[in-house]
Amino acid sequence: TQLLEQSPQFLSIQEGENLTVYCNSSSVFSSLQWYRQEPGEGPVLLVTVVTGGEVKKLKRLTFQFGDARKDSSLHITAAQTGDTGLYLCGTGANSKLTFGKGITLSVRP
Amino acid sequence: DTGVSQNPRHKITKRGQNVTFRCDPISEHNRLYWYRQTLGQGPEFLTYFQNEAQLEKSRLLSDRFSAERPKGSFSTLEIQRTEQGDSAMYLCASLSWAGVEYGYTFGSGTRLTVV
């Protein structure tokens, strides 16, 4: 099973600040997905990245896949309180996803 | 289509009781997954079905856990003789034939508390 390390584990910032969080593995990812999970709800898919070096944007969120496909980053510009949640990265192999422990983001008003 | 539906949303049970959860996936999705999530952790894989066939079970899944998907539509997850360590969020997800790379659609989960 591929191990995913997410960092930092916890992050508390002021509304309007920028932030970057990471997902790393010692193995090459076939593909990588980012999910956001709000308390008491299931995770919601944000993006899938497949190609090394790929950059995808979703409004104020920018996702990057490393050239070697062993790491990924999520950058949020001008964070809002609605961005608060648990950010999970997951990778698929053998027909199922394996997830990291997640990054708990708290955006203060 | 209203997405993946899980019932109940919350369940409190006494240790030693049996509980059953239900998941209704997106109708055209042929794969259905069960995950368990505890506080501060990402979801952990339990088992998955392709249509009505259960194709894989995690070694984490003890004999007290059983899952079914009798007609390839909804699924149930039963836990017998519950223990306090079973307290967790149980998540169901469905996936189309296109593959895991296209991402799961998760339900809102069932929060189990064993007292």
Image (tube, coloured by chain):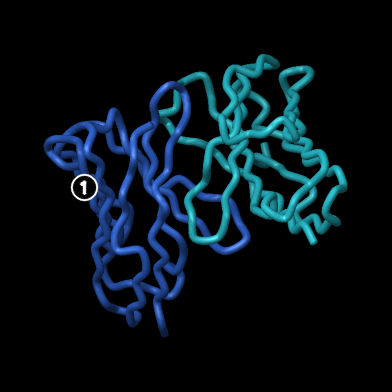
Chain colours: A blue, B cyan
Q: Position of residue A85 (x, y in %)?
A: 46, 64
Q: Position of residue A64 (x, y in %)?
A: 21, 47
Picture quarter with the C terminus of chain B: bottom right
Element assignment for label 1 = strand
- Kindly identify which chain the residue marked by label 1 belongs to: A
As drawn, A3 above or below B98: below
Q: Position of residue A29 (x, y in %)?
A: 27, 32
Q: Quadrant of residue B58?
A: top right
Asked if residue B23 lies left or right of residue A58, the reply is: right
Check the image and name the residue furthest to the bottom. Answer: A109
Q: Position of residue A39 (x, y in %)?
A: 57, 64
Asked if residue A74 lies left or right of residue A86, the reply is: left
- Foreground of the two, B10 or A53: B10
Asked if residue B82 lies left or right of residue A15, the reply is: right
As drawn, A9 above or below A32: below
* 10 Å crowding of disc 1: few (<14), some (14-19), many (20+): many
Report the residue at 85% width, 43% height from top: B18
- Foreground of the two, A71 or B14: B14
Report the residue at 74% width, 58% height from top: B113
Question: Disc 1 marks which residue?
Answer: A64
Report the residue at 21% width, 32% height from top: A51
Three-letter code for the amino acid on which mark 1 is drawn: Gln
Picture quarter with the N terminus of chain B: top right
